Image (cartoon, grey):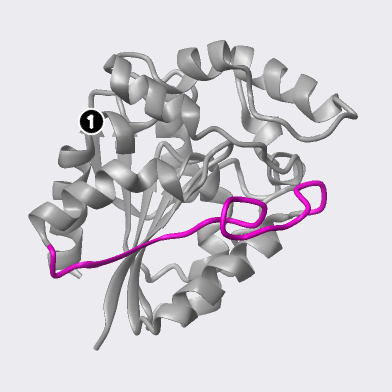
């Protein structure tokens, strides 16, 4: 049976954000197949970001899983991927998804949008961005450094900001619907303890919104843990793989 870990990036990012963690996991456990996807409108997956919605992202990830022929997967959602991965789990079914792992994930109350759930400066910044009639564009560097990269080394920070890309506003403004997500799939949460984009307190509220989370692993780092602490994250993924 073919098994894989599927990594789904968040807003303003592409599959390249996972590169340090994929490398760390390959060094630790070369036997584990890893798929880091590009959601529609990123790098290898061209699309018009003005029209990309949650359903498009779900269909894209499902197609990538089918392409590699994986019989069983662990789905990993970072940040905004929290709106996509429940739909992927619904589409693939509990017989093929052995676990869902959410990392500092967007998880508004069911029926609400990510934008409605944001707090503080981030809510205002995203609101302003959504209201901008111009072409989709990444967040300014200063904003990204402050929200995603606090505490990183200079090399990690440069890698992070170099990979920023534009995103679809619809992912933030469309109400989520997790009603079809199989409740029997084990759920885990990786809580980023120094996160400024999705604060620890908000992540704990998101854990409650999701429900059914059986374990929480706290890593004392910024939002982009896959870049700041790739070895630590790789160890967590390997443990979940062995547990499945």
Q: Tell me if 104 is positioned left or right of 225 in this view.
A: right
At 27% across and 17% down in the image, what residue appears? Answer: 153
What is the residue that sits farthest to the left in this orientation? 28
Quarter that holds the N terminus = bottom left
Q: Secondary structure at mark 1?
A: strand
Q: Is residue 204 above or below residue 57?
A: above
At 48% across and 25% down in the image, what residue appears? Answer: 161
Q: Is residue 142 above or below residue 235?
A: above
Return the x and y of residue 210 as percentages of the image width and height: 47, 49
Magenta includes 48?
yes
Q: Tell me if 41 is positioned left or right of 193 in this view.
A: right
Q: Tell me if 227 is positioned left or right of 16 in this view.
A: left
Return the x and y of residue 213 as percentages of the image width and height: 34, 51
**Magenta-drawn segment:** 30-51
Residue 93 can be seen in this image: no
Pick the front one: 42 or 210: 42
The quadrant in which residue 97 appears is bottom left
SS assignment for the magenta stretch, majority: loop
Look at mark 1 in the image and give the residue it sits on.
219
Return the x and y of residue 68 as percentages of the image width and height: 40, 79
Return the x and y of residue 177 as percentages of the image width and height: 66, 58
The quadrant in which residue 95 appears is bottom left
At 9% across and 54% down in the image, what residue appears? Answer: 28
Magenta includes 43?
yes
At 51% across and 46% down in the image, what residue appears? Answer: 14
């Amino acid at each position: 049976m073919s098994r894989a870990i599927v990594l789904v990036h968040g807003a303003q990012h592409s599959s390249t954000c996972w590169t340090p963690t994929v490398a760390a996991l390959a060094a630790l456990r070369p036997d584990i197949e890893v798929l880091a996807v590009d959601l529609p409108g990123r790098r290898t997956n061209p699309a018009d970001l003005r029209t990309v919605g949650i359903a498009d992202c779900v269909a894209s990830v499902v197609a990538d899983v089918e392409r590699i022929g994986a019989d069983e997967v662990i789905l990993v959602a970072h940040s905004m991927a929290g709106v996509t991965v429940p739909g992927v789990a619904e589409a693939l079914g509990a017989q093929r998804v052995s676990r869902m792992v959410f990392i500092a994930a967007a998880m508004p109350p069911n029926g609400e949008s990510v934008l409605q759930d944001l707090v503080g400066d981030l809510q205002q910044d995203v609101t302003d961005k959504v209201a901008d009639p111009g072409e989709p564009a990444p967040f300014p560097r200063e904003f990204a450094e402050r929200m995603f990269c606090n505490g990183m080394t200079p090399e990690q920070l440069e890698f992070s900001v170099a990979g920023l890309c534009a995103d679809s506003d619809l992912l933030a403004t469309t109400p989520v619907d997790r009603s079809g997500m199989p409740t029997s799939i084990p759920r885990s949460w990786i809580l980023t303890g120094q996160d400024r984009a999705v604060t620890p307190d908000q992540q704990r509220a998101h854990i409650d919104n999701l429900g059914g989370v059986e374990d929480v692993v706290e890593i004392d780092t910024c939002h982009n843990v896959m870049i700041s602490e790739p070895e630590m994250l790789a160890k967590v993924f390997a443990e979940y793989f062995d547990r499945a």
